[in-house]
Amino acid sequence: MPTQTAEVVIVGAGIAGIVCALELLEQGRRVLMLDRDQPEKFGGLARESMGGMFAVDTPEQRRAGARDSVALALADWHSFAEFSPDAHWPRRWAQAYVTHCTQHMYWWLRGKGVKYFPVPHWVERGQFTPGNSVPRFHLVWGTGEKLVTLLIGHLQQYLQSGRLVLRFDQRVEGLLSQDGRVVGCHGVGQRDGNPFEERADVVVIAAGGINGSIDRVRANWHADWQPVPQTILNGSHQYADGRLHDAAQAAGAQLTHLDKMWNYAAGVHHYASSKPHAGLSLVPPKSALWLNAKGERIGPQPLVTGFDTRDLVTQICRQPGGYSWQVLNHKIALKELAVSGSSHNPSIRDQKWGAFVRDLLFGNRWLVRTLVDNCKDVCVAQSLPELVDKMNALQGDDAVQLAALEQAVSRFDAQVRLKPKFRNDEQLRRIAYTRGYSGDKIRTCASQPIVDAKAMPLIAIREFVISRKSLGGIQTDLQSRALDAVGQPIPGLFAIGEAAGFGGGGVHGLRALEGTFLGGCVLTARAAAASIARRTLLDI
């Protein structure tokens, strides 16, 4: 058996693990990080993300004219979360997040060199349930890739000194316990299968959630989302498979709210990934028509993104086949179509203001061309009959009815062509509302019909539910200590980030206000490091 090589073992080298390691190293601790992936994937899913961060009462908000406060943000959080009566720790974590996110996440990251896009985004405004009252989504200038790169840069001095040891291709399969305390972990090499065992004073689980395993996603599918779609794409990390949840549970930890997930309704098949069932998460164009498998407009409440992501998934699950179509044209696509993540937003990722402004003014031609040329879920045609033929050929049936599609498009276009004061279409009302905020106006068409000779060709995108984040996980207190079935901390065991449901085993409740995932990783990681140093970070 090997001797102890570190004071703290962190399982998982994503953003939560990186932040926790950095805090511990600054305290003088010796840290070992174990990760299943390759060294070039250091940073996990955060590296691939857009890098959005939920913060309250920031300089960016004030410049945008948004008056925010802890009280308002907490009220919005509770409204959207719809916490169950027994959600004690999720409620405590919600209060801690809202109270401390600006000081201990936003400004802490600013101190590490992180910069934010000058205009915060306004998402999850709420549809039937009130959501974000003001814009709070602070996009890292450089996306998640820049965020991760900056923080890894701060780790370099500790790698050189030997106080930080990084080992990749290491699959942790279980925890070691002695006299009721977690004292280490064991596993095998991800590729070579060689066994290993590591001992430490403390083990911190930072290995993500369960949503990288579609089997686990199906097994924990929420009752609201019935029936379960036949096709669910994977937009999570392939190694976020719940293996460490099982290990923590075997050590006595409580798992909670695993049926709470943050999935998206507009996933398409990834055209360049080796991950099974890999998908890309589209940001659906607001000016596109969202249709069911028959080509009928989904309603009576039309689907529009930016208000309630969870409800979009609920509605798609109720549609025949459990998938949908969005129909638009080239002009709408240039203005509004986007893909979440760093790889499909190179101007932001590479911090090129000129390219970013060019795409805003003239449309993101690179992205539209990439999807049209490479994504199998995208159809292009010069007429509605031709489009229907291609949609049915793609799906391999005759489900889409030309008459239904023509009716949906003609009715919508007729409303678009009316003067604004005479429009009686809920989708157009929502578009007008969102365009009232400058951050949305520049990215949303004002009055664009679908069939328009000046906006051709027509485009249809087949979309599936895509798995993304686990909102439940290992139950933790405000020090990120893993709790047992009676609510007592398990000595030597901590859980942070998505593994802990981003705090408390379910801080978001039923819905997330967006930007709270990366922020939750930072706060839970810093809380764990403070606790290990016998300090309290999130005092409420």
Image: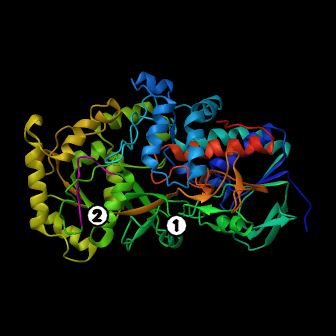
Q: Given the current orientation, which residue lies at the most extreme front position?
A: 85
Q: Main secondary structure of the magenta part?
A: loop
Q: Secondary structure at mark 1?
A: loop
Out of 10 and 68, give the one closest to the viewer. Answer: 68
Q: Is residue 418 left or right of residue 250?
A: left
Q: Which mark is residue 324?
A: 2
Residues shaded magenta: 284-292
Q: Is residue 414 left or right of residue 502?
A: left
Q: Amino acid at mark 2?
A: Ser
Q: Secondary structure at mark 2?
A: strand
Q: State whether residue 270 appears in this view.
A: no
Image position of 118 with respect to 397: above or below: above
Percent coordinates x, y for residue 454 in the rendering = 13, 44
Image position of 262 with respect to 354: above or below: below
Q: The N terminus appears in which quarter of the rendering?
A: bottom right
User: Of marks 1 and 2, which one's residue comes earlier in the chain?
Assistant: 1
Q: Is residue 77 left or right of residue 184?
A: left
Q: Amino acid at mark 1?
A: Lys
Percent coordinates x, y for residue 366 in the rendering = 35, 47
Q: State whether residue 539 appears in this view.
A: yes
Q: Nearer the viewer, mark 1 or mark 2?
A: 2
Image position of 65 with respect to 312: above or below: above
Q: Residues within 10 Å of mark 2 (few under 14, many from 20)?
A: many
Q: Which mark is residue 275?
A: 1
Residue 287 sits inside the magenta stretch: yes
Tally the marks: 2
Q: Residues within 10 Å of mark 1 (few under 14, many from 20)?
A: few
